[in-house]
Image (cartoon, rainbow, N blue to C red):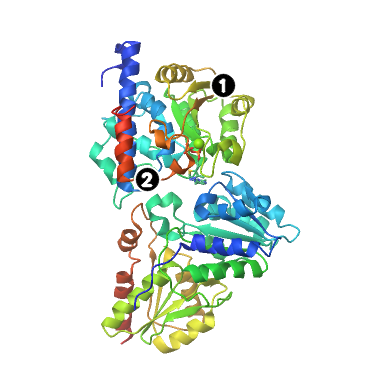
Amino acid sequence: MTNPSARSPEERVAFLEAKARDVRRAIVEMVHSAQSGHCGGSLSAADFVTALYFDLMDIDPAEPRKPDRDRFVLSKGHACPVWYAALALRGYFPVEELSTLRRNDSRLQGHPVATYLPGVDATSGSLGLGFGQALGMALDARLSGRTNTVWAVLGDGELDEGVVWETAAQAAKYRLDNLVAIVDRNNLQNDGRADDILPMEPIDRKFESFNWRVLEMDGHDMRQVLATLEKARERTGKPTCVIARTVKGKGVSFMEDKREWHGKPPSDEERRRACEEIEGRTE
Amino acid sequence: MSLPPAKAPTRRAIMDRLVEAAREDRSFVVLDSDIGYSTYSYLFGDAYPDRYFNLGIAELGTMAAAAGLAADGRTVFVCGYGVFLTMRALEAVRSFVCYPRLNVKIFSSHAGVTAAIDGVTHQATEDLAFMATLPNMTVLAPCDSASARAAFDLARNTPGPVFVRLMRDPLKEVYAPETTFRVGGSHTPRRGDDVTIACLGDMVIQAVEAAELLAAEGISAEVLDLYSLKPWDEAALAKSLDRTGALLVAENHQRRNGLGYELAAWCMRNGRSVPFAQLGLADTFAESGAYAKTLEKFGLDAAAIARTARDLVARKN
Ligand SMILES: Cc1ncc(C[n+]2csc(CCOP(=O)(O)OP(=O)(O)O)c2C)c(N)n1
Ligand SMILES: [Mg+2]
């Protein structure tokens, strides 16, 4: 991959938008092939995960465990199709392996497990506890004198877990400005609207009152995503929370903002329509 | 004669019965933690919104709230996945539900590798160990619609905490709808003289299939369904072993600290030195995959049960 900073800003955005389409198609194909898995929350995170993996993060697929790599933790582990897609397309393992998702003997477990796959450093799937692992990684980076950033992705429903707020307080105590939490604010969780199931607003002021710096972005506007995440990794003496306003199922019209598509696999026909739409063959 | 396919998974069957019972019994409440569409507790929530509390993805706090709701004697049903209810919420279950012996009934789905496809983080493979270890806790593990429906009534009518182990997918029907069940009871869906296969939950179905495989080669296996794990039917096991003189325990759970350890300790205490074997997860995590394939890979399917039973019978002679 060529150095992103060598590209013009327009080229950079166009490149990432094209990559995000590849990631989205891979998500749909993967969950279709497994006939099980989570499309909605994978698609809502697709743009910022693409920006991290194909531009912003200091990583090297040829040396997945290089000590000073940026760390990525998918605390909302059920959305691992987006992570697996980004890792495969970035060269961490063969793209063909994506079709083994959730099958016996596969490295692509239903929820991500550290050490099974190159590039996966944290186990998740039980909500709330990836965030704490990210905090530990940020402490470890500081202890070891490394300058890498730790990126954690949380669901907005995941914020219901009390342990999330333990981690938030701990990060503030140690002024972990190498830790960035991205909240995928799609306003849906398993049983309905996040705002109905357990109202957590104002999320920005909650994090601010925990002594975090808070940024917001349209999680599907690649220009904004890049600008916001670049700012998020600046060191300010505080951990940073980025609230990504997103649409669950983004990119596939019949999945968008629909509760049912939280954890439902597409049929053959739905897969075909979804891929056509993602590739822009229909508008 | 093979078993007919199940009409519904046990997680659904027990909830259908709960919704029925709610029509006459206005006293109980139901709690969920944002998986009501998976536990089917939404069926109750839609019908009785005032008595349904979806407390968000917050299993530990939800269990503590259950203790509070039950403090004056009210019966509280808490629905969720086994991994979260028996691990994240474990301390609340132990110290605030079991210790004061409150009427909190835990309906725990995704038992063992029946949630195979979701992977290890969603497979409750240590839940029986945790729950059966807790003083005052009653533990039930139905295998089909009839026993799951009955488990609702047993849970409601038994004072104190009750844990019911439920499954994600529809499997087979083992019992006729009118079959009765009791706390501390058991059933023998297959009678036999050569070996006792003690089991619970989905392993009852595998054991019945194993008994059929064994019958074809002239081995008569008895299937003992210990759907009530705590308390369990010691008299039934004693009677069965008197006849068969060999014990195979099959459970969709870690071998350690589940049904197998319980029955082995009982055999030792009672001087029953019979040929004994245990099937379950052998100190390992399982993996994502298809349910049937996962059972096969970890030696929990009918073929593995039949193989092991055959060896046990050979050891008798
Ligand atoms: C501790 C825990 N409780 C429950 C679940 C089951 N579960 C999986 S995804 C989900 C909803 C998540 O909603 P959100 O965090 O908003 O994710 P997204 O909308 O991005 O998919 C639930 C309840 C879980 N994985 N972990
Ligand atoms: Mg959400």
Task: Confirm if mark 2 falls within 8 A of ligand 1.
Answer: no
Q: What SS does tag 1 mark?
A: strand
Residue beneath the point at 37% across and 45% down? A265
In the rendered image, which quarter is residue A58 located in?
A: top left
Q: Is A259 situated above or below A215?
A: below
Quadrant in the picture for the C terminus of chain B: bottom left
The residue tagged 1 is: A213
Q: Does residue A278 appear to the left or right of B201 in the view shown?
A: left
Work out whether disc 2 and disc 1 sit on a shared chain. yes
Quadrant in the picture for the N terminus of chain B: bottom left
Q: Mark 2 or mark 1: which comes first in sequence?
A: 1
Callout 2, which amino acid?
Pro
**Host chain of mark 2:** A
Determine if residue B14 is in view: yes
Residue beneath the point at 33% across and 22% down? A16
Determine if residue A87 is in view: no
The residue tagged 2 is: A265
- Camera-side residue of B303 and A187: A187
Callout 1, which amino acid?
Arg
Residue A90, percent from left and from top: 29, 29
For disc 1, the neighbor class at 10 Å (few under 14, some 14 to 19, many from 20) is many
Q: What SS does tag 2 mark?
A: loop
Q: Is A144 situated above or below A267?
A: above
Measured in 3D between alpha carbons, the distance from the residue under mark 2 to the one under mark 1, in whole angstroms, is 37 Å
